[in-house]
Structure formats: structure tokens, C-alpha cells
Image (tube, coloured by chain):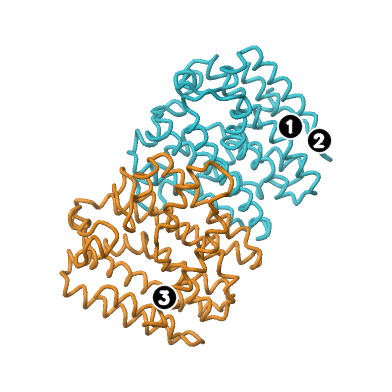
Chain colours: A orange, B cyan
Amino acid sequence: MNELKDFFTDASARVNAELEWLISSDGPGPPRLRDAIRWSLFGGGKRFRPALLFAVGRTLGVPDEKLLRTAAAIEMIHTYSLIHDDLPSMDDDDLRRGRETCHKKYGEATAILAGDALQVLAFQAIAEDETIPPATRTTLIRDLSRAAVRMVVGQQLDLESEGRALGLSEIEHIHVNKTGALIAFSAVAGGIIADASDDTVKAVSDYAEGLGLLFQITDDLLDVTASTEDLGKTAGKDQAAGKATYPSVLGVEATRMKIDEVRGRTVEVLGKLPADTSLLRSIADFLVYRGT
Amino acid sequence: MNELKDFFTDASARVNAELEWLISSDGPGPPRLRDAIRWSLFGGGKRFRPALLFAVGRTLGVPDEKLLRTAAAIEMIHTYSLIHDDLPSMDDDDLRRGRETCHKKYGEATAILAGDALQVLAFQAIAEDETIPPATRTTLIRDLSRAAVRMVVGQQLDLESEGRALGLSEIEHIHVNKTGALIAFSAVAGGIIADASDDTVKAVSDYAEGLGLLFQITDDLLDVTASTEDLGKTAGKDQAAGKATYPSVLGVEATRMKIDEVRGRTVEVLGKLPADTSLLRSIADFLVYRGT
């Protein structure tokens, strides 16, 4: 696991440097808006999605410099969605990654605008990425926009589901959109930038779908088993809100079995990739590990 | 003026058909989100920005089918900004285009998500536009994203200015970002799709900058001189909020003189275009006319 930890640390440092360059503290525009964006963007996120892009890209032989902008864009979209999801009219969360949410710190109006700005800055970052051809940028923007639409759809479905009893397929439908779509894009983008064959992109996509599911199930499990301090966000919140989660429907033990099953098929699909996939395999294992 | 009226009616019908195709009432996703998007998107907007794109595009010889997607994208960005600007934590507006604002009708959470979805759907629409080459799409997305960032900046500056006494240059700085940037893009996009020379794009950009200013000054003037019924939104709202506007700083008469001056230089720049610019000239006149 130490190699993987080094990989995550390195990927995080690289995407942070790119984000710092794109949205520097002394850049143009109203300081309050910039501060609000930076507050959430540099709030201690694990950079899992950018790391996944690096992992897939490197596995397929892409040099890092062609991955940096897209990695930054993915983290901007992720951060925008967290800012808006935390708003009082949405999930009404005061705490995120161990500190105040954007609207608690900067007020609702600025938080909404910070999210709006981050979403569009993500598309700008890719559109201006001169390390990759325009046709590749267009494909990335197309797929990223489709993922971002699915995130909104997932959040809307999630809001509409509160207080209702959901079946497992409904829960998965929400997760596949709300969380899975951007994780899938993070992996698939590596294939797009590598200009990989359709078969390879399909295998990466299947792998990413499994990862997305693993991510959500372990997240649900952590909400039940971990403390607020460990999580850096309010623990037990899903339960308190009466939200349907894997543990609430299946129970904790069956949720752990589900994790094993999903891990199995996620790792299996890697056999179809024409490359050394040990890094991608250990990322799946890492997700399983964090949930136990 | 009848020819111009026909032009606006035709442009509006074309962009509405494209929007209806892109976001149809029986499309996928949660119906409530779709209804909220359509409520604001088909709420009786005049489609001034798409019409401007058609006008510049046609002036430079671009066939309509290459303009439709970008026209729809522009209107989606415009509508998203209206939905978010109307929110309680922002301008707190109950009325827009003569009917309930999105959050009054569908609640705050859905309104925020409807805006988020519209912003990203705009970029998706251009990324998927197969009538124009990928490099053109990339340039359009780059410039549209820059304009959308400036709209957020303008809205933030506008919020921060409330209750403060502003000078005219500060007011113009807000307007150039909040309103001017997307109007400028609407015109410049016609030049980009036409693959026009740098000189031509520069002339179109100067023309659009003048139009944007005309648009804002006449809007400010209408807030003072027109009734709520005529406007379809709450009249006198700027005054009531203590917002700095052209009439509040210059007075009504000097505002009218300013309109004449800006019209003069806006129309003058059209002489640099290698085409019949009568349509573009009459659009400038239309803006002057609506303010009187």
C-alpha cells in the first residue's frame, strides 16, 4: 500500500499545482469570489478523481503534461458540485472536509456564484489546453458535460428521494448519476487523451463503473461505521436524514459482501487492457480497504 | 422597422425549435427538473442574443444550420444566469418575463439545479455540433466559457455594490461583465463560425461592445420610465434597491444623450465590415428605439 500512497500524494501535488496556477490567489476578479472558490478548491480534498485520471493515462502511456488540465477540470467540477450540494436549500451541510462549507464561510450568494464559476472554469481549462488536439478537447468536453448533467440529475433524484423508502435499484440509479458519472469520466478521459481503441475505452469505462459503485458503497458504509472526526464531515447524516443507503437496505454485513463482489468484477475487466494494470488494480483494492 | 420585426420573429422561432429539440418535454431525467428548465427557457424571452448571432452570421455568409446550436447554447447560458440571479440569496425576484421566477414555482433547490444543468447543457450542445469542425467548437467553447466567467464576476460585483454609491466607471465595469460579455460573444461567435479574418472579428467585437452598452443603458432607462406591466418584471426595482444606474447617476436627459453617443460609435465601426451591414445597423437602432 505504500507505493499507492506515494502515487496518490504525487498525483495530488501535481493537480494542486495546476489548480494553483489556474486560480491563483492574486488573479483577477473580485477577491471575495476568488477566496470562496479557493476555500473549497483547496479545502483538503483527496483528489481521488484526478489520481484516477493519472492512473489510467499513465497505464496507457500518456505523459503527465497532457493529463494536467483535464485533471484540474475534473476537480473543479467535483468541487462545484460539493459547494452547491451543501447549500441550505439542498443538503444543508455546515461541515465539509473538516471545516466550514463555502456558504457558511462566504454566504449563500457568493457560494452559488463560486460553484457557477468553477463549473465553467472547468470547461475553459480543457478548451484552452494546447497540449492536446482540438478534436480531443471537443470529445473531452462532450463527455465531461454529459457527466456533469448526470450529476445534476442524480442530485435532483436524491433530493426527491428523501423520506421515501427506496429499493436498491433506485439507490444505484441515483449513485450512478450523482457520483459514478464523474468517476467514470475521470477514467475514460485517460483513454480519450491516449487516443486508445474503442475496445480499450470500453474496458476502462467498465472498470470505472465498478470503481464508482465501490466508491459509493464504501462511502455509505463509512457514514455508518466511522466518526465525524475521521470523516471530516458529519457522520450518521444519511441515517439522520432517513436516506436510503446500502447499509440501510442491506445491513452492514451484506454491504461488505456486496463490496467484495463488485471488487471482483471490477478487477476482472482489467484483463482486457493491453498494459500493466497493477496500479489500477490497487486503486480498486484501496477503495475496498478504506471501507473496512 | 417591420423587416426587423420579421427578422426577430424568425430568429426566435428558429432558436425555439432548436431548444425544443434539445430539451424536449418528454426527454430523459427527472420530470420536475425538466419542467423547471423548460419553465424558464420557454418563458417568453425575446431571444435577443441568438438573433444577434443570426444577424452577424448571416451578414458574414454563414448558413443558418451552422448557427443553430450555438444560438441555443447562448440562450441556455442567458437563462441559467437569470434563474440564479433571481434566487432569494441574490436579487430575490418573484417575477420574470411576466410570470413566477423558477424558484417561486419549483423551489430553490430545483431552481439551482435547473441553472446548473442549463449551463452545462450549453457546452454540451456546442461540443456535439457536427455542422462545424472540432477546432471551431473548441474556440466557441473557449470564448463562451470566458464570457460565462465574466457574467459571474459581474453578478458578484453587482451584489457587492448594493447600498454603495458607485461612479459611472464602476457601473460600466459591472455591466460590461454581467451583460456585455454574453452579448459580445453572441456577435463574435458569428465571426468565429464564419472563419472570418482577425480584422473582421475585431470589428464585430467592437460593434458588440457598443451594443452591450446600449442594451444596458436602455435597460436602466426602462426601469425608470416603463411600467411593471410593460416590462414583464418589477419596474423601479433598481431604484428601490438603491442600485446605481445610468439615470440615477446622470439623470434621464443625460442618459438619453449618452445613448445617442454610443449609438453613433457603434454604427460607425460597421463600416469596417466587408459586407452589407444594414441588418446590424437596424439592430442598434432597435435598442435605441426601445429605450425612448
Which chain letter matches label 2?
B
Mark 2–mark 1 distance (CA, rounded to whole Å) = 8 Å
Question: Separation of disc 3 and disc 1 at Cα?
Answer: 52 Å
What quarter of the picture does the C terminus of chain A occupy?
A: bottom left
Picture disc at residue B279: 1
Q: Mark 1 lies on which chain?
A: B
Residue B243 is left or right of residue B2, and the answer is left
- Pointer 1 local density, CA inside 10 Å: few below 14, some 14–19, many at least 20: some
Along the horizontal axis of the image, is A173 left or right of B241?
left
Residue kind at label 1, given as amino acid type: Leu
Looking at this view, is A277 or A46 the one in front? A46
- State the residue lying farthest toward the top: B253
Please determine if labels 3 and 1 lie on a single subunit.
no
Image location of residue A150, percent across then percent down: 41, 57
Q: In the image, which is nearer the foreground, mark 3 or mark 1? A: 3
Numbered label attached to residue A267:
none
Is the residue A54 above or below the residue A79 in the image?
below
SS state under label 2: loop
User: Mark 3 touching mark 1, by CB under 8 A?
Assistant: no
Residue A107 rendering spot, x and y as whole percentages: 38, 40
| Circle 2/circle 1 CB separation < 8 Å | yes
Q: What residue type is labelled 3?
A: Asp
The residue that label 3 is drawn on is: A206
Q: State the image coordinates of residue B125 (x, y, percent, origin top left).
A: 55, 53
B109 sits to left or right of B219: left
